Amino acid sequence: MHHMPTRRAFLARAGALGCSAAASPVLTPIAMANAPGENRLVVIILRGALDGLDALRPIGDPAFKALRPKLSDGGTPLGDGFFALHPDLAGLAPLWDSGELAFVPATSTPYRDKRSHFDGQDLLEAGSADDAGSVRDGWLNRMLTLLPGVSARTAFALGRTRMRILEGPAPMTHWSPGTTLELGPQAQLLLEYLYGQDPLFAEAGHTALEMGLAEDVAPQGGRAGEVLARYLAQQLRDETRIASLSLSGFDTHQWQKNRLRPALRNLQATLLTLRAELGPIWARTTVLAITEFGRTARENGTGGTDHGTGGAAILAGGALKGGRMLGGWPGLAESALYAGRDLMPLRDVRAYAAWAMRDMYGLRASDLARTVFPGLEMGDNPGLLL
Amino acid sequence: MTTPASLAIIRFGLGPRRDAAGLDGAALMADLDRVGAAAVTPFATKLARAADRAALRRARRMGDMADTKDRMDAINRAEQRDSLSDLRAQLAHMIATPVGFRERLVAFWANHFAADTRNGHFRFARASFVHDAIRPHIAGNFATLLRAAVTHPVMQNYLNQNVSVGPFSQVGRRSGRGLNENLARELLELHTLGAGYTQADVTQMARLLTGVTFDLEAGYKFDPRIAEPGLIEIFGKRYGGRPMFERHVTDALDDLALRPETAAHLAGKLARHFVSDAPDPQLVAHMQASYLASGGDLRALYTAMLEHPAAWAAPLGKARSPMLWVAASLRATGVTPEQILTLTDRDTRRDLRGPLQAMGQAWETVPSPAGYDDSARGWITAQAMAARITWAMGLADRLPQPPDPRDFVTTAMGDMASPQLARAARGAETRGQGVGIILSSPDFNRC
């Protein structure tokens, strides 16, 4: 199914190839009525293992300062002041105050002990309990299979990297903003004509031409996350309801004080750009930012942190009942650490994603625990949404 | 209905290059005996580099920091360079070989035994793995191919076999280490049976595989000290004993190769790869029966496919993978192997490696142990098509003397061009644009 084409591409198609408006399924009221509602879910994958203890600093924990001598100065206290935002996330503090931001400070996937980025990310995206190898598709795609009226534009994966989280049997679109085609109008017409003749190529070829040639979506500069967010907002205003993108640069083994800054600023810019660009739709939006695992509770000898276990998940959005910390805090005392070295993860991060999807799309908990996150104990509803 | 003369080279080969009309099944089978392969980095080099890296890491732990970083960087740069050289060699070979049925089969089996080296001891060693473990065995007995692929250090490293220890082995009892079932599961699910096994079978197979390991000096080895002792029953047959020998493992692999489930899995997958995402069940049944009757001979499997009329049904139902499409484009436009081999590393990145990644088939990587999805739809996504169009137009732009598109339709498609493609070729503004459109067309992206 095609989304509303740009006027230019639409006229070119309609004029040259005899398509009529009636043939565009998006223009028919039936297609709209079957769409999966107005709520938007954006899942941001923070690749490289975000240090939750640095992004959201537990300054009220008596053990924190000793564990993080070089990585604990400054920050913007939130709420009762037990946690403080990293200085490069300070721009998110107003969202906390207005209830559009929440954290799960100590969570993780079920991945334990092996600490490989690739395996950890595979598990995060597969959504399975232990071995991602036995699951070939992604949990967001499996969620799509439970929704009515899903078209190729309902779900959107952004960026050049593989987005396993959205791979699977349900239709979706994967596109990287900035993928441009330089084609003259004649070449474009001829290719539109050829792709239109062949069902295998009709959708993909048309989308490639339309999106690759669209001038109004060219990236306008800024941080990588800003470009993605601006582009994504455009899709979310249109037909897209579920989206995923990834941000990287979080693997900070050395000199984290400096090296984490660009990645956090990128994350902050992504969230703030999305909020600004979505306008009123932000009120129907929930953003979930998750990472493959946390980092060691202690700084290492080179001013960085190594691969750990528990870490923070970040929730944002106008649809969120925010301004709170979810899921409790295990503490940083020696005896409270996982394996004596990592923040202890409390509740499975998949439970938050599952409850958010249940509340946003009216899905049954039993379907989520069977299809989307097989074997997950969802537990009590954390009441994430307003 | 007559079979188009170009069907063989498009469906079973690498695409028209010179005069490839009139190939039949016998000519395709003869391609299996063609000698020659891409000159990729030998796996021995990859193994030696892994050993060097391990030695440097040990030196660093001992506090010998002096020049370890520089030396490590030098090794990793050499690995990067070799990987680009391997890509050039592979594509040059795909241009040079006249038919390419053999290359298509190498690619098929390399995807069947999907493994890459992003994790663990090796770097960019997938091409070497394919060269060592897959290529020599694609026209023999499947059991030989299975053994070579499953026990190769790259596959072991990818599926964690090298950390699997029999809990009651000499080492297991002392260290408390245990099984890793990863390779055992993929062996049953992906490499052989496909269906008809239980978790208990996976565990039994993992126990049986425990002696299979490798080290960075010798490569593959069977180590009785980590092998789980005792009889292990799989599908009603007992293997192993005290002590465990390597032949207990190879016996089990040989038996797996001849299971009817394996025959069905391989026949269906091969027919889906070459002929159609939904192949004629009679074609698959014929292939399966021939495979079993021959005792697991891959030539019998291929012959059964090529002699069945359903394999020659006319519409092209599959999509060329990015690697195949790039090779077919280079062949059709007359780019020479020398032109590819003499590309700089920078150009190789920009013109080959980067585009292949954007098209969805990054050199040296596989998406999962199941390999690429391999369905026509799996390759033809919007982003991949944008990358294909961009690359095709770029190639056409750089041809010193682009051919007349009206002729190039025939060069590229033989007698299988659609009337629509012929019409579009006539409508192009310039010769180069016409060539780019033909390479980007549905016709040329199919196989």
Image (cartoon, rainbow, N blue to C red):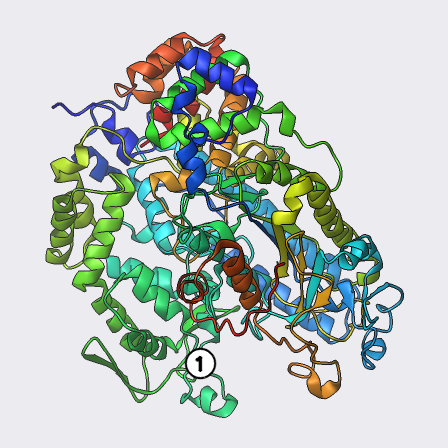
Dot 1: chain letter:
B
Mark 1 lies on a secondary structure that is: loop
Residue B103 position by quadrant: top left
Can see residue B322? no
Say which residue label 1 marks: B165
Q: Which one is nearer the viewer's eye here, B337 or B269?
A: B269
Residue B394 picture location, percent across and down: 54, 23
In this rendering, the answer to whether A262 lies above or below A201 is below
Q: Residues within 10 Å of mark 1 (few under 14, many from 20)?
A: many
Percent coordinates x, y for residue B151 in the rendering: 38, 66
Amino acid at pointer 1 = Val
Picture layout, residue A359 above or below residue A229 = below
Q: Residue at x 45, y 37 (%)?
A: A32
Residue A269 visible at all: yes
Residue A311 lies left or right of residue A202; in this view the side is right
Q: Is residue B197 left or right of residue B37?
A: left
| Residue drawn at x 46%, y 91% as measured from the top left | B173
Nearer to me, B173 or B318: B318
